[in-house]
Image (cartoon, rainbow, N blue to C red):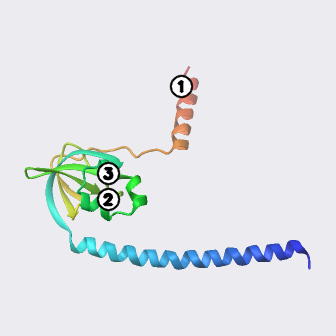
Amino acid sequence: MNTGLIVFIVIMVILAAAIVALIFLGKRAQKKQDEQQAQLDAMKQTVTMLIIDKKRMKLNEAGLPQAVIEQTPKLLRRSKLPILKVRVGNRVMSLICDEKIFDKVPVKKEVKASVSGIYVTEVKGLHGKAPVQEEKKGFFKNLISKAQEKAGAKMVK
C-alpha cells in the first residue's frame, strides 16, 4: 500500500473519533445547561428596579459579594461579564445580566425584571417608551455600507 493512503486513513479515523467525542460532550453540556435553566426558572422573581448603569467588567471589579467571586471558576473571573448597577427600593446593588438581553436593557429607566438570585434573566415592562436601538453592524457590513455611501456621493457630484 501507498504510505500516503495509510496516513490519510489514520487522519480520517482520528477525525471521526474527535467528532464522536465532541457530540458526546455537547449532549452532556446541553443536559447540564437545561438543568441550570430549570433552576433559574424555579427561583425567578419579578422585581421593579431602576437601572443606573450597565457595563461589561471583570468579576472582581463588579462589586459583587465575595461569596459569589469565590464560587466562580478561576477562568471565568478574568473574563468580562455584563453587569447592571441597579436600585431596588432604597438599596443599590450590582447584578449579572443575561448576555441575550444586555443590549436591550435601557439605562436610567425603571423596569420590571425577572431576577433569579443575582442574575437578571429578562426585562419586562418598561415605564415610558423603550428606546429603539439600531442593530449593531459587523466590521465587514460597516465597511460595505461606508463604501456604498461614498460611491453614492460620487455619483451625485
Residue at the disc numbered 2 = 98
Q: Earlier in the sequence, mark 2 or mark 3?
A: 3
- For label 2, the SS is loop
* The N terminus: image quadrant: bottom right
Q: Residue at x 75, y 73 (%)?
A: 11
* Earlier-in-chain disc, 2 versus 1: 2
The residue that disc 1 covers is 153
**Callout 2 amino acid:** Asp
Left or right, residue 148 beside residue 125: right
Spatial CA span between label 1 and label 3:
49 Å
Q: Which SS class for mark 3?
A: helix
| Residue under numbered circle 3 | 60
User: Outermost residue toward the left?
Assistant: 90
Compared with 113, 150 (above or below) is: above
**Residue at image x 31%, y 47%?**
61
- Please state which amino acid type lies under the numbered disc 3: Asn
